[in-house]
Amino acid sequence: MQEMPDFKDPLKEQEWPLAMAACDAFPRHTLEFLSAPDDADRTVVAPDFVFIDKKSGERWNVEVKRLVSPHIRRQYAFASRLLSKELDEVVPGLYTCEMRLDSLDPTTQLSLPELEAVIV
Amino acid sequence: MIRSGVRDGTLPEHFEPLPGYRISRIGDDWSHVEPWLWDYTLEPGSSRETDAFQMLSSEFHRHLDSALEKFDAHPADRNILIFETRGTLLDRDLHMLGPYADGPGLLSQWMSEATVVWDARDTVIVDPHVSNWLDGTDRAILMGTMYSADEPYTPLGTIVRLWPGGCPDFAGLRLGLESLMDPSECSCRDLSS
């Protein structure tokens, strides 16, 4: 497993293991990280990572896409941060907390008062 | 309610403190909570589920176009596009679990609708990132929907190939599609001979 380069863009840290998994899916090729655009604004139109095949010298573009609605991702991050902060080392056992969202409605939001009521 | 339940020792295995919120204990070994978001009004096979899949399909094709734009701007010998499905309907229930799940088939169907611009240099794959927990009932709980807190991120499922370009020795599931690249055409074979 290659060590992850230092990236300024935090999304790159999430995408890196996926890119590694993709590289592992081609066992006859030894792919080594070559480059990646690393701007937090993501204004550069370029693949997320470029690897080089150590044997052939061929360049491999690797692009990672997350197939999830942005509003669901935002609400998930919100709930995750809040619950992790409030419940760390409080709850014995592993629990799931299920919260309903309308995946078709981009304006749907979790309620902070409701979340706090669930916790307290 | 969680804090008071812990304080009083009355935290149940399953409870719904408010409408739309359900909390279930599924393990004893850790002290950890992971929120799991889903739209329970989307019953399998319902018209709303179809609408949600349509939305995901639009996102899928938008991502395909975006990836092509990047690949065209920076030509390389091979292009790998990988989709991650966490937090979508494709990870719900059995949509992405196992080789007979219908999620990969659905994605493959979407892929087949946009094949004209992809060639033998390209491989499009999907990482079904789910793990399966049983909560004591017949219902399966899917974990692994963390994003920012998921460090390090570890792909859990078997990678599925949606578009069969690139090295024919792809290690994941292939959905029965024939490889577009003949083994003799791949650089790994050229160099080993």
Image (cartoon, coloured by chain):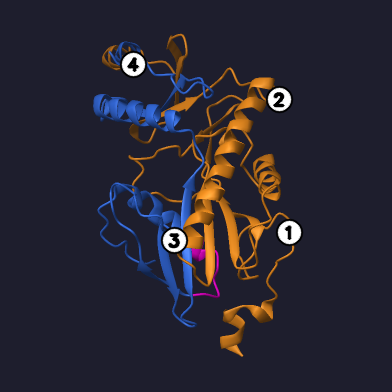
Chain colours: A blue, B orange
Which chain letter matches label 2?
B
Q: Which residue is mark 1?
A: B177
- Residue A26 among those drawn in magenta: yes
Label 3 vs label 4: CA separation?
36 Å
Label 2 vs label 4: CA separation?
30 Å
Query: Quick check: B61 left or right of A13?
Result: right
The span shown in magenta is A21-29
Which chain letter matches label 4?
A
Dividing the picture into quarters, in which one does residue A95 lie? top left
Give the residue type at disc 2.
Gly
Label 3 vs label 1: CA separation?
23 Å
Where residue A120 is drawn, which disc sits there?
none
- In front of the other: B123 or A115: B123
Residue under the image location 71 percent in, 50 percent down: B112
- Residue B34 in percent (x, y) is at 39, 31
Work out which residue is located at the far bottom of the displayed protein and give it: B193
Dividing the picture into quarters, in which one does residue B105 lie? top right
Q: Which residue is mark 2?
A: B45
Residue under the image location 29 percent in, 25 percent down: A82
Tell me which numbered mark, 1 or 2, is placed earlier along the sequence: 2
Q: Which residue is mark 3?
A: A20
Residue under the image location 45 percent in, 14 percent down: B15
